[in-house]
Amino acid sequence: MKTILFLLAFILPVQTFASGTPDGDTQMRSVSSERANVRSGPGADYEVAWEAGRFYPLEVLGREGAWVRVSDYEKEEGWIHSSLLANAPAVVVVTKMANIREGAGMDYEVSWRAEKECSMKVLQTDGNWYKVSDGEEELGWIHGSVVWGFSGGVELEEQAAG
């Protein structure tokens, strides 16, 4: 992933995101700033390996001080400053195109189509379907088979309230 990722804006407050435990579970975070440099080493003096945008999900591999070693859906690794990460549940489209539907199921109309590497915040889950947002408005529902990131391992605040 050598290209710059163009991603959607984020305004809504963050919600609970799958977090790791000492027994080795995957720990996921998402980019909280509009743009973030992912570097080749743990420090601002290291070369920028790639740039990620808001809501881009990253798997945490380790830490060194304020720097977090991460991996993306293509298994590319790098380092990002911890202040640029959030616990917001997020997914990135990993197929060429993905349908965003009006409801959680194939019977619902397609609202719009998201291109590969489009990142979105997860608001709610229904089985393998994720209700997603660009941070300003709800976009619709996307199937888990076309995205990477949030694994559905925790309840979201919106679901817990219902």
Image: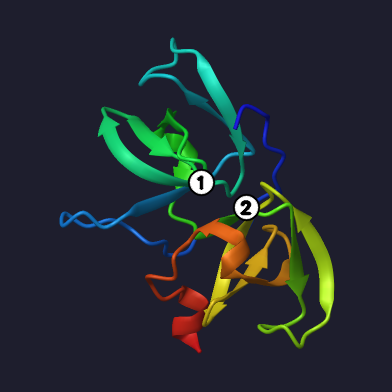
The answer, for residue 40, to whether it is visible in the render is yes
Q: Extreme left residue here?
A: 23
- Residue 68 relative to residue 111: left or right: left
Q: Of the two numbered discs 2 and 1 on the same chain, state the one appearing first in sequence.
A: 1
Judging depth in this view, the residue of 67 and 111 nearest the camera is 111
| Amino acid beneath label 1 | Tyr
- Residue 73 lies, in percent from the top left, at 51, 46
Q: Name the residue: 76% across, 75% down.
A: 101
Q: CA–CA distance between discs 2 and 1?
A: 8 Å
CB atoms of marks 2 and 1 within 8 Å = yes
In the displayed orientation, state which residue is furthest to the top. Answer: 45
The spot of residue 135 in percent (x, y) is: 67, 58
Relative height, residue 153 to residue 103 (above, below): above
Which of these two is toward me, 124 or 128? Answer: 128
Q: From the image, which quarter does the N terminus lie in? A: top right
Q: Secondary structure at mark 2?
A: loop
- Label 2 belongs to which residue? 94
